[in-house]
Image (cartoon, helix red, strand yellow):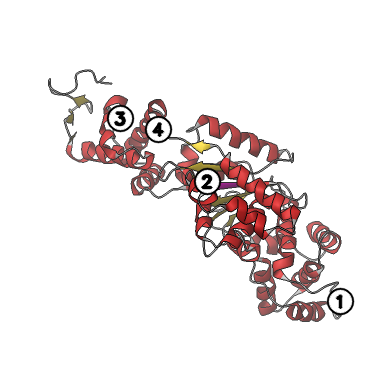
Amino acid sequence: MSDFSSQQIVEALRSGVPSRTVGAYFSEARPAMMRQVRGKLAALQEAEPVEGMIFTGSYGEGKTHLLNTVFSLAAESNMVVSHVAIGKESPIDKPEQLYQKVIAATFLPGAKQPGFRAKIEESLTPGSGITGELLAYTAKEMETDRLYYLLRALIGAQDEDAREVLMADLEGDFTTDAVVKRCYRSVTGKAAKFSQSFSKKKHVKDYFHFISHLFHCFGYSGWVLLFDEAELMGRFSKKARAKGYCVIDSFLHPDPKLEQTLSFFAFSSSYAEDVIDKKNDTETVKAVFEMDPEALKSANNTLNAIINAPELSPMNKEEIREILINIQEFHGLAYDWKPAVSPETLMQATETGGYLLRTKIRAAIEFLDQLYQYGEAGETRINELGKENLDEEDIPELEVL
C-alpha cells in the first residue's frame, strides 16, 4: 500500500518547492551547519542568551530547505515559529510593516495553519492567571501604555466588531488611539489616559516584546523567526538598506524584552560582493548614521555578520549519496514498490541534472519515475525481481544491490 506522507515528500521534491515536511525528514543534511543550529535551539530552550544567525548560499543550494528544517526542529521543541520572506511586501527597514507579516506567518507548535487568535480567546479570560500577568506586564514593562488599555478592552469586550478591531490591532492592523480609548471606556466606564501618543513607527517594539512575552506565558519554549530571501534588500534604496541593517541587528542581538527569541536570516552568497562591496554600503551606513553612533555600530554589526556568515557550499558526493538513498526509500514507500537500484547508479543518473542540489534531486526522481512506470530508464532496466540489469557495455564498475 502506498504511503501518503511519502507521496507528499516526493511531490514536494519533484516540484522543487521547499517544504517543511521535507525539512522534517532531511534534517541530517549539512551536519556542520546543523550542529550550530541545534546548539542555538538548545540554548533557546534553556532560556540562555543566544545570538541569531545569518547564513548564505547560492541559488538552488538549499537555503529555504535549511530554514524549513529549522522550522521543523523548533516546532518539535515546543517553539513558536514565524517564517517570512523579505521583500517589498515585508520590508526589513520598516518594522511596523514587517510586524504584521511576521504575525500573519506565525505558527504555534503542531499547528497546520498560522495564527494564535483561538489561543488568545481561550486563555485571556477575565480573572485568569495569564490575564493578570499580561495586564501587569503591559502596565509596567512597555514604553507606552497603549497595550495595557487595549488588552483591558479586549478582555472585557462583548461587541464582536470591537473585539475584531482590537484583535486585528494585535496582529498589526493598527487602529487609532481614539478607537482604543472608546473601547476601553465602553468596557470599564472609565477614560483611558495615555502617557504618550502611540506611533507605530516609534513604538512597534512594544508589540514584538508583548508577543514574545505572550508566548512565554502560554508555556512555549521560545519564538523562532526565519527570514528568507534577505538578499532582496539589495533592491532597496541606500537609506532603506542602512535602516534594514539596524533592524537585522536588533533581531540578531535581541533586547532582553524580546524574550526567548532566536532569528535566522538567509542571504545569497553573492550579497557581500554584489551589494555591500559594489554599492559601497560600508560608506553608505557611515553617511546615513553620521550623527547616530549607536545606529552606525548596529548597522556595521550586520554588515560584518553577512560578510563572515557561514556558507552552504555545494554538497560533496557522500552527502548527495545519502540524500539520494533517502529519496529512493521515500519513492518506494510512496508508490508501493522496491526500487533496488544501487546508489552509484542513482548518482550517475543525476550527473546530467546540472550542479545544483535542487536539479540533482529532480533528476533522481525522474529516473525513479521512469523505472517505476516503464521498468527502465536510460541504460538501466528493472528485472522481475525489482533489481537493475546492465548490458555488458554499460559501465561495468557500478555495484548492483
* Residue annotated with mark 1: 193
Q: Which of 265 and 246 is in front in this view?
A: 246
Residue 238 appears in view: yes
Q: Earlier in the sequence, mark 1 or mark 2?
A: 1
Q: Is residue 370 above or below residue 80?
A: above
Q: Which of marks 3 and 4 is nearer the N terminus?
A: 4
What amino acid type should be assigned to the residue bearing mark 3? Met
Q: Is residue 273 above or below residue 329?
A: below
Asked whether the residues under the numbered discs 3 and 4 touch, taking CB atoms below 8 Å apart as contact, a structural biologist would say: no
* Residue annotated with mark 3: 347
Q: Where is residue 11 in the image (x, y as percent from the top left)?
A: 35, 47
> Which element carries disc 3, helix, strand or loop?
helix
> Which element carries disc 2, helix, strand or loop?
helix
Range of the magenta residues?
A: 263-267
How many callouts does the rendering have?
4
Quadrant location of the C terminus in the rendered image: top left
Q: Distance between the residues labelled 4 and 1?
A: 60 Å
Asked whether the residues under the numbered discs 2 and 3 touch, taking CB atoms below 8 Å apart as contact, a structural biologist would say: no
Q: Earlier in the sequence, mark 2 or mark 3?
A: 2
Q: How far apart are marks 2 and 3 (CA)?
A: 33 Å
Q: How far apart are marks 1 and 2 (CA)?
A: 48 Å
* Residue annotated with mark 2: 272
Q: On the rendered structure, is 206 left or right of 111?
A: right
Q: Answer with the quarter of the image where residue 191 lies.
A: bottom right
Q: On the rendered structure, is 95 left or right of 271?
A: right
Q: Earlier in the sequence, mark 2 or mark 4?
A: 2
Q: In this view, does 268 lie above or below 88?
A: above
Q: Position of residue 242 (x, y in %)?
A: 62, 57
Residue ID at (47%, 45%): 270
* Residue annotated with mark 4: 323
Q: Where is residue 200 in the image (x, y as percent from the top left)?
A: 70, 69
